[in-house]
Image (cartoon, rainbow, N blue to C red):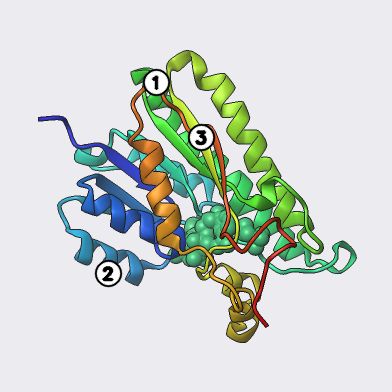
Amino acid sequence: MEKKKTALITGATSGIGRATAELFAKEGYNLILCGRRQERLDALQENLGKEAVHTLNFDVRDREAVFLAVENLPKEFSEIDILINNAGNAHGLDPIDQGSLDDWDAMLDINVKGLLYMSKAILPQMVQRKSGHIINIGSTAGKEVYPKGNVYCASKHAVDAINQGMRIDLNAYGIKVGAINPGLVETEFSEVRFKGDADKAGKVYKGYQPLKPEDIADIILFAVTRPYHVNIADLVVMPTAQASSTIVKKEP
Ligand code: NDP
Ligand code: 8X3
């Protein structure tokens, strides 16, 4: 029987990460699920099965915590086949002259540096084994810039560049690297962006059918189940109602 693959998913407590965890659990993967909200990690482990799920609670901004968590994985979970760099969010939506420095720090520290810390912690074992698959969750915001998106878009453009750089540098080791770049997906993303303002967040997804986190989970599963010679290198996916970051066909 083929050995069960182990996937580590950052940002597994909500949205795209949680949907991916649920789908991968159904498909029989061993899972390392990461996030900061312990009660959600506990619920995931309870629902998805204690044997197949290991949880890690750390902030991806805390580089020591990232390395400690990866170094101290129990033996059954220590060999990571798939890394899904998903943790991230937008913080604020302001013109550049009015943006908050704390929001800027959060986006660059989480979306860019957090992704780098996670990758740096896990890459040595993939390089040594000459195998592995990294999926970076980018965004349409990493392909184009929209009004008031400034620093969030910059963080996702950085993910786009890092995805390309990883693919180039890891090519020699046979490690697959690819990005999935979603458009509008209804998750807690806008609630975080608007700092808990549920009304404002809800309006982002009104008047059209946004993507569901499960739609992205399906695509991630598709990417990791391609034959070895096929790598989904860079994929953009939007709701049908969306044509670009700023053009969304909404019903009145
Ligand atoms: P959610 O807010 O629903 O989920 C974000 C996840 O990231 C949570 O599990 C959260 O867990 C985790 N996270 C956030 N900050 C940290 C941190 N400092 N350390 C560790 N974990 C953290 O949003 P989405 O599911 O929508 O977002 C997932 C990814 O998809 C992000 O990278 C986002 O940029 C990207 N994306 C989202 C789109 C959308 O429209 N929703 C479109 C394009 C891309 P916890 O709070 O428990 O730590
Ligand atoms: C999330 C999509 O358009 O809100 O990355 O930036 S958007």
Instruction: Give the residue pinned by disc 1.
Output: 229
- Distance from disc 1 to disc 3, alpha carbons, whole Å, reads 13 Å
From the top left corner, tell me how far across and down residue 56 is, in percent: 35, 54
Residue for point 54% across, 67% down: 210
Q: Secondary structure at mark 1?
A: loop
Disc 1 residue type?
His
Q: Residue furthest top?
A: 172
Q: Residue furthest bottom?
A: 199
For the residue labelled by badge 2, is the local secondary structure a helix, a strand or a loop? Answer: helix
Q: Nearer the viewer, mark 2 or mark 1?
A: 1
* Residue under label 2: 43
- Dividing the image into 4 quarters, which one contains the N terminus? top left
* Labelled pair 1, 3 in contact (Cβ < 8 Å): no
Which residue in the protein does label 3 denote? 178
Amino acid type at image mark 2: Ala
On screen, residue 59 versus residue 147, left or right, reads left
Q: Is mark 1 within 8 Å of ligand 1?
A: no
How many numbered badges does the structure rendering display? 3
Residues marked 2 and 1 touching at CB (< 8 Å) = no
* Quadrant of residue 42 within the rendered picture: bottom left
> For this rendering, which residue is in front, 113 or 150?
150
Q: Residue at x 33, y 42 (%)?
A: 7
Which x, y percent locates residue 218? 38, 51
Sooner in the amino-acid sequence: mark 2 or mark 1: 2
x and y, in percent, of residue 142 in the image: 68, 47
Residue 77 location (% of width, % of height): 25, 41
Amino acid type at image mark 3: Gly
Is 151 on the left-hand or right-hand side of 216?
right
Between label 3 and label 2, give the one nearer the viewer.
Answer: 3
Res 18 → quadrant: bottom left
